[in-house]
């Protein structure tokens, strides 16, 4: 990827190695002020060299050899537009709705129907195909416009490419050389001439000896130089549909000759209303194929990859060591625990568990399932979210965010606001493997401590590779930049594709279809207050008798650990 236009790459000499471009000016003089105006171009080359004084001596060899035909040629031009960078905003919202327009001679193609809403760095992934007669129609103009529903579309900027220079350049700028020669597939050879034909033409143009193929295409000799395929391909190439060895070897030799490779160039956009001020950049490349040489190979498909729909199922089993925020009427510390969860950027999918009331030791039981749907770009490893920025917005804006799951511990209050206890953040791309037991779930295994080594940390895993995992994670709060443990969560994380989710259905919480796995309500007893005579009655109980009289005072539930304490 070149960070500049192909003409500005030093090794290609402005693509004016065959002929140079000279601007023709016409202007008027007003006093001491001269106002020249460009009215055309002259293309040509000049060579000045001394002649021998002795007429008997031979004159120097001609400077121009293998001149191309001076007749106009009909060419197929393929323009690949990859993306734009840092476009100037045109809307009041500080963004723009860009689309591409390509002009060559009298032919114009635009993609207004497929404008990209509210984006200053759009990925277009478009290919435009036009025919032109070079050099009569040599200036290719690529413009970026801002779509407007009511008013006239605004031009953001444009760039102009001289196709004649690329077509005549001996650096092979008409079609970049790929890394390997394939006869089919996504990397199929698309030039009209094979590598051996290109190598023969290059040898004739540079006055080299014609290449000689030996050993069934494993070696090529040009003059005194010999090239072997084993020197370029010591290992088997990871490509399908590889072409014959002599073509692959000829391509490797061509790539040593300082020819233009397959590339993407970055061109600056300008607008005549603001001359000299950059309006953004455009990443693109161009292929030019003369019609007389026959049909070229198929074009590249550079359509952006679409996101894949995933379903994340998160089962909240238990909590442990949750800090106790309240005090009950008996003077004991307690919390009414529940868990809240969502994916970053998808807050509208926020979900809560039910409440575990009157936890006296920080333990809670839920058996509750969260389900989140999201679209994921596998190559970029980000979520794709489309939302309207404002109520009155006509189009949705595409945003990309890391796939992060947020789980929070809360203490439920009937009268006042609920109390926030702590949180757990899991980046599905890379997170610490959970521990098997709650006792071993410590901060030292999940956070780098000053006095601990990195060997004590849990290994990093990806849920997109692991697919499913169960264990304990710590919930924390931060004070002065340091994490403090506020509780532990036992979770099962399972990632499924849309098809897998249809084959193995499951409902939110404990709703139907309650399966994969089936979640039973936690076992509990009614919240009870023990009568004052229990200590006296307990003294008279026979060893082994475990019946305790209680008086039910409410409908709130308590769970196993609290029942045992009673």
Image (tube, helix red, strand yellow):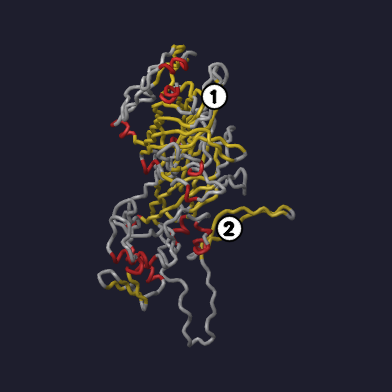
Residue 304 in the image, given as x and y percentages of width and height: 41, 43
State which quadrant residue 482 falls in: top right
- Count residues near mark 2 (Cα–Cα under 10 Å), then give few for <14, some for 14-19, many for 20+: few
Residue occupying image coordinates x 39% and y 54%:
75
Q: Nearer the viewer, residue 427 or 498?
A: 427
Q: Residue at x 62, y 55 (%)?
A: 26
Residue 464 shown left or right of residue 332 in the figure: left
Q: Is residue 119 visible?
A: yes
The residue wearing badge 2 is: 24
The reply to whether residue 124 is visible in this rendering is: no
Q: Is residue 42 above or below residue 381?
A: below
Per the image, label 1 sits on a secondary structure element best described as strand
Given the current orientation, which residue lies at the most extreme right position?
31
Q: Residue furthest left?
A: 216
Residue 305 in the image, given as x and y percentages of width and height:
39, 42
Mark 2 against mark 1, which lies toward the viewer? 1
180 and 325: which is toward the camera: 325
Q: How many marks?
A: 2
Do labels 2 and 1 touch, CB within 8 Å?
no
Look at mark 1 in the image and give the residue it sits on: 333
| Marks 2 and 1, how far apart at CA | 90 Å
């Amino acid at each position: 990827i070149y960070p500049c236009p192909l003409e500005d790459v030093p090794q290609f000499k402005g693509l004016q190695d065959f002929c140079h471009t000279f601007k023709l000016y016409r202007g008027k003089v007003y006093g001491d002020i001269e106002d020249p105006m460009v009215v055309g171009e002259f293309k040509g080359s000049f060579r000045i060299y001394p002649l021998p004084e002795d007429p008997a001596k031979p004159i120097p060899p001609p400077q121009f050899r293998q001149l191309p035909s001076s007749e106009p040629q009909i060419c197929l031009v393929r323009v690949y537009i990859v993306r734009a960078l840092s476009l100037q905003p045109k809307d009041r919202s500080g963004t723009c709705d860009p689309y591409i327009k390509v002009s060559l001679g009298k032919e114009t193609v635009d993609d207004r129907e497929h404008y990209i809403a509210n984006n200053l760095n759009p990925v277009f992934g478009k290919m435009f195909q036009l025919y032109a007669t070079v050099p009569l129609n040599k200036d290719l103009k690529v413009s970026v416009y801002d779509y407007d529903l009511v008013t006239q579309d605004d031009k953001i900027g444009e760039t102009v490419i001289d196709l004649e220079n690329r077509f005549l350049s001996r650096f092979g700028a008409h079609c970049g050389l790929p890394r390997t020669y394939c006869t089919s597939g996504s990397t199929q050879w698309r030039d009209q001439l094979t590598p051996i034909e290109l190598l023969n033409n290059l040898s004739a143009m540079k006055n080299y000896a014609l290449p000689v193929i030996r050993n069934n295409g494993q070696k090529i000799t040009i003059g005194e130089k010999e090239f072997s395929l084993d020197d370029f391909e010591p290992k088997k190439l990871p490509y399908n549909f590889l072409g014959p060895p002599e073509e692959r070897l000829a391509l490797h030799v061509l790539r040593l000759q300082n020819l233009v490779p397959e590339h993407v160039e970055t061109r600056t956009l300008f607008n005549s209303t603001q001359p000299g001020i950059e309006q953004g950049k455009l990443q693109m490349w161009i292929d030019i194929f003369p019609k007389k040489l026959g049909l070229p190979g198929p074009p590249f498909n550079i359509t952006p990859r679409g996101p894949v729909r995933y379903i994340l199922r998160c089962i909240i089993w238990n909590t442990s060591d949750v800090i106790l925020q309240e005090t009950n009427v008996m003077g004991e510390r307690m919390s009414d625990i529940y868990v809240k969860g969502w994916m970053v950027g998808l807050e509208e999918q926020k979900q809560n568990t039910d409440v575990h009331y009157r936890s006296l030791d920080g333990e809670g039981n839920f058996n509750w399932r969260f389900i989140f749907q999201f679209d994921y770009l596998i190559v970029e490893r980000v979520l794709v979210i489309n939302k309207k920025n404002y109520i009155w917005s006509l189009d949705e804006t595409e945003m990309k965010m890391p796939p992060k799951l947020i789980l929070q511990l809360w203490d439920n209050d009937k009268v006042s606001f609920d109390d926030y206890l702590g949180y757990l953040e899991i980046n599905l791309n890379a997170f610490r493997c959970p521990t098997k037991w709650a006792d071993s779930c410590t901060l030292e295994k999940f956070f780098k401590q000053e006095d601990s080594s990195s060997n004590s940390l849990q290994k990093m895993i990806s849920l997109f590779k692991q697919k499913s995992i169960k264990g304990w994670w710590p919930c924390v709060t931060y004070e002065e930049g340091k994490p403090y443990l506020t509780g532990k969560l036992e979770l099962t994380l399972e990632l499924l594709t849309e098809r897998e989710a249809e084959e193995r259905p499951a409902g939110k919480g404990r709703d139907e279809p309650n399966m994969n796995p089936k979640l039973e309500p936690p076992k509990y007893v009614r919240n009870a207050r023990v009568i004052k005579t229990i200590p006296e009655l307990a003294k008279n109980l026979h060893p082994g008798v475990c019946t305790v009289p209680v008086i039910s005072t409410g409908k709130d539930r308590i769970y196993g650990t609290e029942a045992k304490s009673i």
